[in-house]
Amino acid sequence: MKEFLKTNTVTYNLMSFTGFKSILIFSLLLEGPKSYSELQEILKNHEYLHETISSDTLRVYLNSLREIGCKITRKSKNGVTRYSIDSHPFVLNIDEKQIPSIIKVYKALTQSIEVSDLLALQQFFAKISQYIQDDELKEKLSKVSPLYNIDSKIITDLMACAQNNWEITVQYNSLSTGNKYKNITILADKLHISNRKLYLSGVNSEYDTYASFLVSNINNIVSINMHNRTLDVPKLTVSYEYSKDDNEKFELLSCEKIINEENNKLTIEITSNNKFDITQRILSHSTKCKVISPDDFKAHIISTLKQMKEGYIEKH
């Protein structure tokens, strides 16, 4: 422990190799049936172990797992005997009181980590949910991720496109297309989370404008053009007035700056090449916010609010 606190690095001195090998063999047998020779090969090529283990030693590890309650079965086929774990005593006891705390932490993490890390985190929670007995709690945990119900293959492909500024054509479903899928081509810029939803931002080739597209509305990737293009999108600057409550701490975005402050009224300037992001920021302030300039963006916000109102009227 002292060595770890001093160097913040895991070394061989800090590892219990017996315990590590037990956990590793346990996880390997959970993945699927393995023969002694397959286990030996994995342990020999493991980045930390590089150790040749005899069949007798492996037999000791398997018997130890049986002793702690693992049900290990052996099956022979074509002269090869393989072992697998059918059941074990390790169950996560997560109750209704703990789930809200886990979800709260999970939601907080989604605001500050990269999409690649969020994808790994979602896969981690998917593994955890397998060991939760309560189906209702399991469902709550599975739905908390902004990536819920989105094909992970689509996400990884979009990440590659955004990192390399590749041009991508997708089947996209939106209100503007009457809830019908339409092929659109996007020069990808970034994949990001906004308001707990996953978006792909980039230049829409049809209108030559920078926009954000809800990834959950992407049905399929039609094609990817792996030819790098330079993103040259003019930035939009919007000024708005924010009415702050007494003792309220206003948190600026990295793209914002305060240009005037009088009493509890802040005049803020936000600059971005993404009109959608600015719109989302303005709407998130609700009635505390009023757009000052430019006039065409004021008209855009008014039109957006009218569309939102009409949508509620139609539903009721």
Image (cartoon, rainbow, N blue to C red):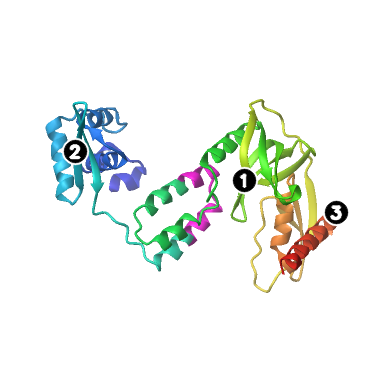
x then y, percent, for residue 298: 84, 57
Q: Where residue 45 is drawn, which disc sits there?
A: none
The residues tagged by marks 3 and 1 sit, at their Cα atoms, a distance apart of: 30 Å
At label 2, which amino acid type do we have?
Arg
Label 2 vs 1, first from the N-terminus: 2
Amino acid type at circle 1 is Val
Label 2 sits on residue: 74
Image coords of residue 82 (percent x, y): 22, 34
Residue 177 seen: yes
Q: Nearer the viewer, mark 3 or mark 1?
A: 1
Residue 107 inside the magenta-drawn segment: yes
Mark 3 belongs to which amino acid?
Answer: Pro
Q: Residue at x 82, y 60 (%)?
A: 302
Residue 294: numbered disc: 3
Tell me the tag on residue 215. Answer: 1
Residue 42 lies, with reference to residue 176, above or below; the image says above
Magenta-drawn stretch contains 274: no
Mark nearest the camera among 2 and 1 is: 2
The residue stretch that appears in magenta: 104-120
